Amino acid sequence: MMNILGMLDRPTSGQYYLENREVNSLKDIELAKIRNEVIRFVFQKFHLLPKTTAIENVELPLIYSDRKSTKGLAIEALEMVGLKDRIHHKPS
């Protein structure tokens, strides 16, 4: 269910609307843009890059956004989930 809500998987039946848009028929590039600009989630477990720090893992999707500054946003996001003290730690 979380993969469908995050638009990583497509439902086999029914319709999924996000912000009044039916997302089932959107192209992959459109789904990626929505994930980056609307949902903004950070993967846990195997989706983290093992050789990069927590802050680098959070900053990576922000690089593809239209934002001029990303460092403050990444720190803020890590702080919101109680990980500010681990910004320089790697996933392992």
Image: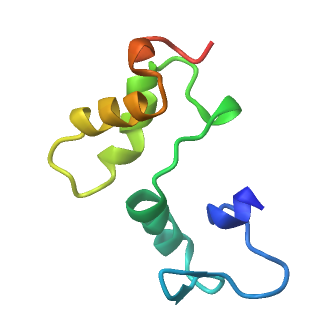
Q: Please, which colouring scheme is shown? A: rainbow
Q: Answer above or below: position of 13 versus 68.
A: below
- Determine whether, in the image, residue 23 is placed left or right of residue 64: right
How many marks can you see?
0
Q: Quadrant of residue 70?
A: top left
- Residue shown at 28%/39% (left/top)? 73
- Residue shown at 41%/34% (left/top)? 80
- Residue shown at 63%/34% (left/top)? 44
- Residue shown at 38%/37% (left/top)? 77
Quadrant of the image containing the C terminus: top right
In-front residue for pair 91/77: 77
Q: Answer above or below: position of 65 versus 7.
A: above
- In the picture as drawn, the residue positioned furthest to the left comes out as 68
Q: Residue 18 at x, y = what percent?
A: 54, 78
Q: Answer above or below: position of 87 versus 38.
A: above
- Determine whether, in the image, residue 62 is placed left or right of residue 2: left
Q: Residue 33 at x, y = what percent?
A: 42, 66
Q: Residue 38 at x, y = what percent?
A: 42, 64
Q: Answer above or below: position of 11 versus 51.
A: below
Quadrant of the image containing the N terminus: bottom right
- In the picture as drawn, the residue positioned furthest to the right comes out as 12
